[in-house]
Amino acid sequence: MSLPIQMKHVVPLVIIAVLASGCSSIAPAPSSTTGAVFVPTNSPQPAIATHTAASTPHAAGNQPEQTLAWQQVQAVLPPEVPILAPTWLPDSIHKLQPQPSLNIRHDSLSGFTYAVSYEAGHRSYLTFSVGSPSPVQRNADTKVSLTLRGTNATLITQGDFTSLQWNEQGHTYAILSAGFSLSQDDLLRLAESLRPLAPIPAQTPDAWAKARALLPPTIAVYKPGWMPERFGQAELVEAVTGKADAVRYTIAYHSGSEETVFFILNIGADALGNSPPTQGTSEKVRVLGNEALFLAAPEDGRLELNWHADKQRYQMKVYGKGHQVTRDELLRIANSL
């Protein structure tokens, strides 16, 4: 049985793979998490305004923030996904020394989404996000339409929460703020200060390397040492950093026969929550020396393995009536992790 290698040192901008006896681990960067921000859905009719922000943010060399979080986003996302980082931050953000956090996801509906947050305590954060738009609260105090970065934008406030959102290059960008008492001018200046990150050397880390690079070093990432030949390369569906109870990832392998095996940490995408199949059979088995539960639901072609290790929940799932994965094959993959 091979155990994941835990590495303590991180080299920025480089994702390092270690392969030994069928196991792999990549040195990640520690990171924190941002609480979910839900912004209510109906709001007053918007006012119309036009804004021209200061065009010379006072960051050294007018270069984007090169924190490790932004470097991680850039290392993980495909080069065609535009990453705009701030070249200016308000003094209150620098003084409080908030820690960046990451939330990166890819799905077929919204494409790639990510968020980089600067936090100072539970309710103070400044988040730069790309992806699905945030819902608008019904009881929002104000909703103002603006012209920003040459396109239409919407500024919403509710109490000390503010959301600035616009579309650019086919993606939805948003700046979310709470607890920092940032003015409207601060948020608009932040938006105007965004610049593309400088290119980094080409690299093609696999899905497991990407997940390892994003998650805290205390979280074990288990990569299969064996997969049936009919399966292709791994795909990173989701990776979210945070505290131990919030960290998750989903990695998928697809075959030409439309069968998919998902590897999931905690409640990841395609985990279908904690609910077992309503019909089928269950069996206690062993995975890497840990007691595990094997579930089979022939009616919908669902197979599952669930076990706990290192105080985390790990899952493997197979869906689809047409898949060829057997119980023994799934256990062989699991015990090769």
Image (cartoon, rainbow, N blue to C red):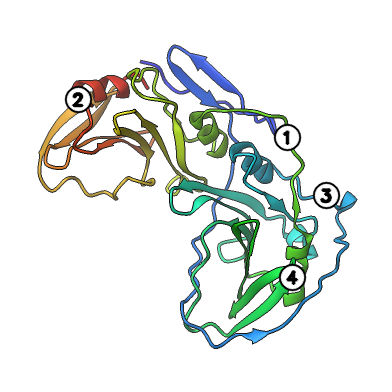
Query: Which tag, 3 or 4, sits closer to the chain's start?
Result: 3
Dot 4, how many residues are within 10 Å of its Cα: few (below 14), some (14-19), or many (20+)?
A: many
Residue position marked by numbered label 2 in the rendering: 326
**Distance between the Cα atoms at labels 3 and 4?**
18 Å
Residue position marked by numbered label 3 in the rendering: 63
Quadrant occupied by the C terminus:
top left
Query: Which tag, 3 or 2, sits closer to the chain's start?
Result: 3
Residue position marked by numbered label 4 in the rendering: 188
Q: Secondary structure at mark 1?
A: loop
Residue found 47% across the figure and 37% down from its top: 236
- What x and y, as percent, mark residue 3? 42, 20
Q: Secondary structure at mark 4?
A: helix
Per the rendering, the mark at residue 200 is: 1
**Distance between the Cα atoms at labels 2 and 1?**
42 Å
Query: Which tag, 2 or 1, sits closer to the chain's start?
Result: 1
Tag in front: 1 or 3: 1
- What x and y, as percent, mark residue 190? 75, 64
